[in-house]
Image (cartoon, rainbow, N blue to C red):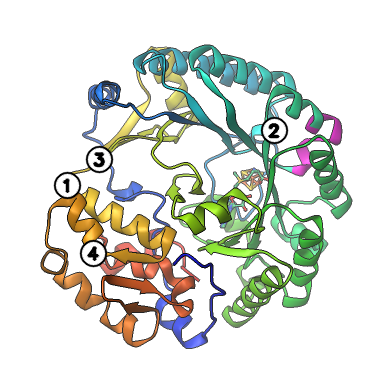
Amino acid sequence: MSELMRPSFDLELIEKYGGPGPRYTSYPTAPQFSSNFQAVDWYAAIAESNRLPIPADLSLYVHVPFCANPCFYCGCNRVITRSPTAGDQFLDRLEQELALVAPRFDEDRLVRQLHLGGGTPTFLSVDQLGRLLTALQRHFPFAEDAEIGLEIDPRTIDPRGIAQLRQLGFNRLSIGIQDLEPDVQQAVNRIHDTAMVSSVFGAARAVGFDSISVDLIYGLPLQTTAGFARTVDTVGGLRPDRVSLFNYAHLPHLFKAQQRIDESKLPTPSTKLAIFRNTLNRLLDVGYEFIGMDHFALPGDSLVKARRDGSMVRNFQGYSTHGGLDLVSFGPSAISQVGDTFAQNARGLDEWGIAVSEARLPIIRGLSRNTDDAVRAEIIDRIMCTGELVFRDIEKIFQLKFRRYFADELEALEPLASDGLIEWTNHGLRVLPAGMLFLRAIAKAFDQYLKSADEQSSRFSRIV
Ligand SMILES: C[S@@+](CC[C@H](N)C(=O)[O-])C[C@H]1O[C@@H](n2cnc3c(N)ncnc32)[C@H](O)[C@@H]1O
Ligand code: SF4
């Protein structure tokens, strides 16, 4: 699908295909990672990647796990603290982790991308963020035009801080807004007025950040179509380059803070759908393009270009313009990928910190893809990123007969074809406008590991 489409919206299809499913930021997905995976396996994968004729350049991720206050909806791995020493202690440990990992990569492998996520990276002061950047640059060579981005919570930074971040070398921002209505903010314990968001935004534009993206969530308590429309209109008026519109994943058995959400105040499924439909249409009407799943971007944005020319990829940070990079991640719960091998750090701050302070890799689980995993990963990536699958392409790369190898999967997709989500082409399959909201449901047909219905419903958020 080279042209970006306006997804169509059909209640019956949402009922049928909008149930739980993985987000496919990797395949196999993280629940498949094995605790038998050891540090030696990880070091071996890195060594192998160095030996390739052209080793991949690098994308770095650092998970900064702290927040000063709990947002009740939050499903991220974070530690709530106001300790003034937490930041520096974390950076001490992070430098220990860097010293363990970075020397394993050949020195000429350039960093093309760095992203700080969390938690709240701006829990750290500007000086501490400078220390973090310097440490990374001491260990890895950065490309001159590297994308250097971080997530910010508007409550934790002012316009002066934004200008300082730009001076440090950050060139991309992702601002967590979620919802601007006071009663919703109260219900989720995250209060920041529109003026605060606008001033952060204005400052970022003034000092020349290359790209600004914004996170919104629909499905939060007390949200209404009219209220969320006000948020969307305000956000649309700020013209962020990208908008992520997340479907609130309410999984209180997994995320304790969510137990503080009053479930009687959650919007009904029909209100939630109305909010989603309105937001989708409003964003498209004011000039945003639908990238896939929950992502929108302005036509001039690099993600739209990558989506059109087929170079967009999907990884742990969502959709990305940079394909073919090895991902090296630091901090608690961070996931790395080098070639076909994944490794995940311990989730707990203490467990992670103790390991690195004892000069042990903090990895607790991982996985090396076999050939079957790699084929399916390629197929799922193509569906999620381009909405199209040419069987011959897969046959050429993996030397198999597509229709024979995937006979069951193709049969499982028949109902989706009858319902107009996909169409069969001469060469393979193509996602239709009615299927654009259900990329995950289409990709799921190729997921080997999704066998039991139980597994599907307890771990994953709803697709729509
Ligand atoms: C690490 S946070 C962003 C940075 C910063 N901590 C902030 O909140 O502004 C990443 C994003 O995940 C999204 N998010 C968190 N919990 C979620 C949930 N339960 N369901 C859907 N999206 C969620 C929010 O939109 C949030 O901005
Ligand atoms: S949404 Fe952001 S600020 Fe709120 S608790 Fe989660 S990580 Fe922290």
Q: Which residue is pictured at 39% across the width and 18% down the height?
A: 101
Image side of residue 337 versus residue 220, left or right? left
Q: Nearer the viewer, mark 4 or mark 1?
A: 4
Q: Amino acid at mark 1?
A: Thr
Q: Nearer the viewer, mark 1 or mark 2?
A: 1
Tell me if mark 3 has few (under 14), some (14-19) or many (20+) residues whose alpha carbon lies within 10 angstroms of its own: some
Image side of residue 326 versus residue 411, left or right? right
Q: Is residue 41 above or below residue 238?
A: above
- Residue 355 found in image quarter: top left
Is tag 1's residue or tag 3's residue first in the polypeptide sequence?
A: 3
Q: Which residue is mark 2?
A: 122
Residue 252 in view: no
Q: Which residue is mark 4?
A: 391
Q: Which residue is mark 3?
A: 34
Tell me if mark 4 has few (under 14), some (14-19) or many (20+) residues whose alpha carbon lies within 10 angstroms of its own: some
- Disc 4 and disc 3: Cα gap in Å? 31 Å
Q: Nearer the viewer, mark 4 or mark 3?
A: 4
**Mark 1, secondary structure of its residue:** helix
- Disc 4 and disc 1: Cα gap in Å? 17 Å
Q: Amino acid at mark 3?
A: Ser
Q: Which residue is pictured at 34% across the width and 79% down the height?
A: 423
Is tag 1's residue or tag 2's residue first in the polypeptide sequence?
A: 2
Tell me if mark 1 has few (under 14), some (14-19) or many (20+) residues whose alpha carbon lies within 10 angstroms of its own: few
Is tag 4's residue or tag 1's residue first in the polypeptide sequence?
A: 1
Q: Nearer the viewer, mark 1 or mark 3?
A: 1
Segment colored magenta: 154-162
Picture coordinates of residue 224, whole percent (x, y)? 73, 75
